[in-house]
Image (cartoon, helix red, strand yellow):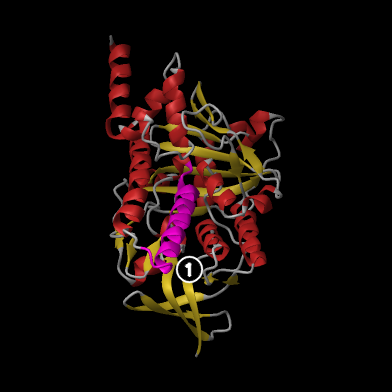
Amino acid sequence: MTTESVDVLVIGAGPSGCVSASYLFNNGVSVKVVEKTKFPRLVVGESLIPRVMDHFAEVGLFPALDAMNFEKKLGARFIRGEEICVFDFSEKYTEGWDWTWQVPRADFDNTLAQEVIKKGVDLEFESEVISVTFEGKNSTTVIKDKEGNLKEIKAKFIIDSSGYGRVLPRLLDLDTPSKLDPHSSIFTHVKDVNRPEGEEGTLISFDILETEVWLWVIPFSNGNTSLGVVGPTTFINSLSDKSNADALRNAIQLSDYYIKRFGDVDFLFEPVKLENYSRSVKKMYGDGFALTGNSSEFLDPVFSSGVAFATESGILAAKLIHKELKGENVDWETEFTGYMKSGIGVFTTYVKEWYTGNLQTLFFHQPENPDVKRKICAVLAGYVWDETNPFVKKHDNVIKNMAHMINMEKEA
């Protein structure tokens, strides 16, 4: 068995892995990335939020992505029957990017990975992690390549960006139940043959079919659109006992807004079901490793936070490892877990209050309150560490209390 040695081994070549590997490489740290699959590959998480752009820009990956001409996402639209609420990212409380992208992730992730390889990072596809052993912080990881050959990689640190693969959580028994109720989704891509001209055709939308059930519509610049239904697992399972395709068709029939556009379009692949997708871990780091992105926490797709948390944790882990390799002290509990948990906590509240209906009460309340809307918009854009925003700082109570006041007014 051959042996390689690097400062940092990154598991997974998705956005989190590519951002952390780029940061480390740019700062002179020897890094290797191993990826189990062959790219391009299908993956969910096609709608980004503006905060993610900070990370791509900082590590030098933005120009390659920008050259792909992905569909620009300037905000998001929420539909509930006749009611419509549109958030515009240029009208938000916190300074920051006011646009992002809607992306077919196969193309997006492949662009990132190829750019990382172009930089000079050693990225190995179709290499699966078989085992990991730690001696203090130093680790030995055994990987198997596509020919079945085994290889050892010795590293001073491991960043696990394996997403749903959850390599270290599985190997080190770190999984723990999510605090969110079990939800599932079914999604596919369609050739959007009935796409209207102009903004209507390109706008990302969430169509609320009932309080806890919604359809996502994410148009891409290549003429295809991602369609998915999300709801409590029991509801998703009740849509059909025949097939995922049948279930998704039945969900589209429930949408007054989209039935004409998508009622009879062909699915480009057999719809994929993600069951009970929310994830959590007992700890986000340990001696010699850090968990980033979906390998630690995954909340819910309703506000498209997945990739942003992945790259936020990826770049932060890379920065802290770089500090440590230079001999500086790092307080991982405060600087990594504490920081990430505060942002995840804000988004968790918003997801929970979405499903209670309280957040929907705020979204669709008329007349709109522009100040409240700007503050909520900053959260939806991913600026969830800005504690000058009361909708961040007081997230535990502010949505609940405002919804309660609105409901009291209505009753009065």
Q: How many marks?
A: 1
Specify the quadrant that holds the C terminus: top left
Q: Which residue range is magenta in the image?
A: 304-328
Do we see residue 328 in this rendering? yes
The type of residue carrying mark 1 is: Ile
Do we see residue 243 in this rendering? no
Please identify the residue farthest to the front as the structure is shown.
Answer: 327
Residue 181 appears left or right of 225 = left
Residue 293 appears left or right of 21 = left
Please check the rendered image and state whether residue 17 is part of the magenta-colored stretch, yes or no: no
Where's residue 406, x and y in %? Answer: 33, 17
Vertical comparison of 19 with 289: above or below = above
Where's residue 388, x and y in %? Answer: 37, 31
Q: Main secondary structure of the magenta part?
A: helix
- Judging by the rendered image, the residue that carries numbered circle 1 is 11
Q: Residue at x 38, y 36 (%)?
A: 212
Where's residue 237, x and y in %? Answer: 40, 48
Residue 162 appears left or right of 390 = right
Vertical comparison of 385 with 334: above or below = above
Q: Using the image as rendered, state which of residue 254 and residue 299 is in the foreground.
A: 299
Q: Using the image as rendered, state which of residue 296 and residue 210 is in the foreground.
A: 296
The local secondary structure at tag 1 comes to strand
Where's residue 253, x and y in %? Answer: 53, 36
Please identify the residue farthest to the bottom as the structure is shown.
Answer: 1
Please identify the residue farthest to the top as the structure is shown.
Answer: 412
Q: Residue at x 48, y 79 (%)?
A: 143
Q: Using the image as rendered, state which of residue 353 and residue 398 is in the foreground.
A: 398
Q: Residues within 10 Å of mark 1 (few under 14, many from 20)?
A: many
